Image (cartoon, rainbow, N blue to C red):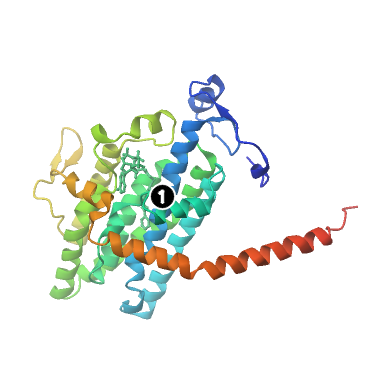
Amino acid sequence: MYGNDFTQQPIVEIAEDDADFQAILDADGRIEPRDAMPEAYRKNLIRQIAQHAHSEIIGMQPEGNWITRAPSLKRKAILMAKVQDEAGHGLYLYAAAETLGADRADLLDLLHTGRQKYSSIFNYPTLTWADMGAIGWLVDGAGIVNQVPLCRCSYGPYARAMVRVCKEESFHQRQGFEILHTLSHGTPAQKAMAQDAVDRWWWPSLMMFGPPDESSPNTERSMRWGIKRFSNDELRQRFVDMTVPQAQALDLTLPDPQLSWDAATGHWEYGAIDFTELFEVIKGNGPCNAQRMAHRRRAHEEGAWVREAALAYATKRDAEREAEPPAAVA
Ligand code: BYC
């Protein structure tokens, strides 16, 4: 474990083939802040954790869009709590990146200038209330499948942050399922609205897991370092296998005529994913990329006074503490 004084320790860089580092990984141990680590390991972690954090805070926007239009007070309260949870996830993740020596303001700058990515999924519009159900069920469902293995990530602070994130994502996934269940067992118009949302969110949810393994440049190294425990395609398959029976329970159809059970492999086979769409969205050409980024930059500028006030208060409190040190313990 580490204390809060890790920022006082220097970052110690070691060779990628360092035997002690490898021994910790081989024993499924955890690397902690300011443990000696290869520079490429540190950089790769900052890349993934920062992009994960950006996804969480941009992910607040599609659902925030429906807070004022939730169909009941109860639905509104639940949705507000969920969107706040996503902000909290962003906070844990930015804090985890900071333990690696990254500066949060720099990371946000990289997001705002388009030099770091965020998940493709949040560049799709939320057109109806049923989209809140489809996001909870499919997007958070995919998020859980991707993030549960990260609870065993070799970097301690990231792994520990994921434990809490996954608990909250499980609640999110169930609330999405429950919204869709209510709609699919409601009027024909409500059922059609639920089906339309599932039709629009299914393929983008499969794309969340990233490019296919043969075109995933980061996977091999990340798996060797125990950051990723499974490849993109392995997790995608796990998600499909988990979701098909849930769709049946919802009495909704997944928009893939090629979905079929393969008894020999024990998996659901699915049709070809249009990865050109994923790459276009990642490049910034998705339906809502420009809107999401403009909103994020505006929120950051409008929130400057909150950051300034918090900093002024912290500085004042530190000065007061220094002037009046705590009484010595007898
Ligand atoms: N969208 O070599 P690859 C959530 C990028 S949060 C955009 O396979 P890696 C939730 C990738 O970054 C959802 N970019 O990369 C939140 C890389 O570019 P760079 C986010 C994508 O890292 C709120 C390049 O493509 N989850 O669930 O080995 C509400 C090549 O890819 C995407 C996380 O961030 C994409 N879909 O694997 C509800 C989890 N896919 O960085 C839900 C943590 C790939 O080299 N992250 N790229 O410039 C991960 O598990 C991995 O980073 C990924 C990608 C599986 C996403």
Quadrant location, ligand no. 1: top left
Q: Which residue is mark 1?
A: 52
- Residue 100, above or below 178: above
Q: Indicate the amino acid at tag 1.
A: His
* Quadrant (top left/top right/bottom left/bottom right) for the N terminus: top right
Residue 132 % position (x, y)? 29, 66
In the picture, measured across the screen, residue 325 lies left or right of residue 26, that is right
| Left or right relative to 148: residue 10 | right
Residue at screen point 40% across, 57% down: 112
Residue situated in front as seen by the camera: 66 or 13: 13
x, y percent for residue 251: 17, 61
Which residue: 64% across, 44% down?
A: 7
For image coordinates 33% across by 52% down, the residue present is: 119
Residue 167 at x, y = what percent?
45, 54
Q: Position of residue 250 (x, y in %)?
A: 21, 61
Residue 237 appears in view: yes
Mark 1 burial class by Cα count in 10 Å: few <14, some 14-19, many 20+: some
- Camera-side residue of 271 and 112: 112
